[in-house]
Image: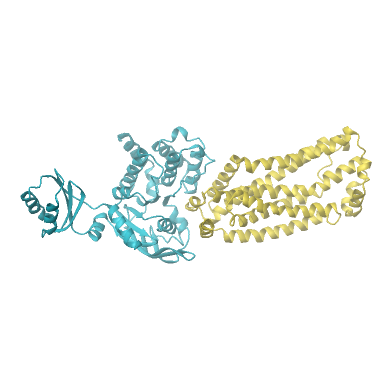
Chain colours: A cyan, B yellow
Amino acid sequence: MAASIRKKQDIFNLEGKFAKDFMITDLENVIQVQNLTHAYGTRMALDNISFNVQRGEVFALLGPNGAGKTTTIRLLNGLFPPSGGQMRVLSLDPQTQGDQLRRHCGVLTETPALYERLTAIENLQFFGTLAGMSSDILQNRIDEWMNFFDLSLRSKERVGNYSKGMKQRLALARALLHNPQLVFLDEPTSGLDPESAQQVHELMHSIRQKNGQTIMLSTHHLYEAERLCDRVAILNRGHLLACGTLVDLRQQFFPGERVVFEFLVPASDELLLSLTAHSSVLKVDQPSPNSIKIQISATNVIPSLVSHLVSLDAQIVAVKPYLVSLEEIYFKLQQESSQ
Amino acid sequence: MNTAIILAIARKDLLEIRQNKGAWVPMVIVPLIFVIFLPLVMILIPASMDISPQTLAGDSDMQMFIRNMPASMQQSLLGLDEMQRLLVLMLGYFFAPFFLIFPLMFSTVIAAESFAGERERKTLEVLLYTPATNRQLFLGKVLAAVIPGIGITWLCFLVYTLVLNTAGFGVFHRLWFPLATWYPLIFWISPALALLGISATVLISARVQSFMGAYQLSSSLVIVVLVFLFGQVSGVVYLSVLVGMIAGLGFWLIAGVLTFLATRGFNRSTLLLGDIHSKKR
């Protein structure tokens, strides 16, 4: 772990001037999207969505296949014009200033999409040159990223011979090679082993901390999003179902507080009925025979609940606060949207 | 205009071609047959097997071919013996249209690999996410096809010249090739055909998903060559200097129109949305 962090520090200390050249300053919202709409023929891919992404944030786009995540990334990079709405990315208009904008963006697509007949170095040299990097800086950064992703020993090998995980790591190196201000990562840990996935998570954390880079992450891994992202946008069939921090989303969709009581023996029906009837309790669930999850209006009622349960001879072994996960919010919204 | 980006795109495409045997093997075999093997057979076999050139040159079709030749071309036969006349007719005139295959073949193979191949290997979208402008992407890819398209044709011409003059020295006792008709063919028509082949392939590549699909469709351009081949054999059209210059002008005009259409349709929106729609079909 320490070695990995040292490696990262080396990368971010490298060529500070280059990083500075690409730094966009005084931008609070690096992405501003208003009423963005896009249709492929008759199929609506995005329907009137609006959100902002702030500088230095890790922002996740969540949703099932066909939700509009990839279309959003394509539009934000100016690959084609939207059917309606407005966008500003790094204070630039993706449609009219796309070439300028893409100098500051790095994109990891759903599939690594590398030139498999070329070597890893040839791939990175090609994309670095297209990003306008000078050859000496490019060579240094190639060496550093190849080291970081443990690809140095096979850097002169054709990419077609690489494993899926190696290709994904090389594609990540390609996206980050020119030290972009804004990084779009579409399923960055797809195909990676747990160790490499952990390395990518650390990397995402580091690039934001060191260079203030903004990351837009598109993922199916809700745990990954919950752990790494400051804010999330949940999409379904082109509709924005919700957008905000996890705390915001909990308050919006799962109001109130939750607490879990664990008992030495299975909770009796009498205990459950008594809790349901209690004035401070809004809802009672029994996730397992020995535990009860209770929704309450505020945490200050917990002592009285404990006293109440003790008076009923309940053998409490633990009382834990329960935080609604992103997964629960996500599935609740997706189910409601489908209905 | 950032030439480094254009050159990087061209270099990358050429590196990829080098690794694709299916693309470059025909580009080596076909020239070997037309530039070295067949000329050697035609020069060396009649001598070694004692085939009488009078028999071949006296053929009625050959006589008709000579009769219908423009005066400027007939002059090149004056003072030659039967064997020399036979070689000038066969290798100097009949073979000329085959050289039009080279720029077409080389440029369409590379353009198909470069444009349709990028789509087939699903690397197109990543390329579109780079800061390269649409014009830089187009020029880089055209450059990757046009340089070998013209360069290898000229190299073939050089090798053909060496083979004909070396192997034919025993017959002519002097350097007899190239004939005047070859200059417009190689330096005027060939570049036009290379550009025509590339622009046609770009247009075709926008509508097909694979390298082979694009290559097979663009190969139909070889009809252009067949027109000259059969036109000349049947005594209707001869690739004289004048015809070469006029035909070249026509090819340049067609190539210009096709290039205009290809550049107009070559933008991120068309490339990517075309790709998305074609995947759905």
Q: Is residue B79 above or below residue B273?
A: above
Q: Viewed as shown, does residue A46 lie left or right of B275?
A: left
Left or right of B2, for residue A319: left
Q: Does the rendering let one see residue B58?
A: yes
Q: Residue furthest front?
A: A269
Above or below: residue A17 compared with residue B166 = below
Question: How many numbered marks appear?
Answer: 0
Residue A181: x percent and y percent?
38, 51
Q: Where A232 sits versus A315, above or below? A: below
Residue at the spot 32% in from the left edge and 50% down from the top edge = A222
Foreground of the two, B176 or A223? A223
Q: Is B36 placed left or right of A166 in the picture?
A: right
- Please give the name of the residue rendered at 7% of the width and 47% of the height, measured from the top-left corner: A313
Residue A39 x/y as whole percent: 45, 64
Q: Residue B71 placed where, x, y %?
A: 89, 54
If the image is split into quadrants, where does the N terminus of chain A sit?
Answer: top left
Residue toward you, A146 or A163: A163
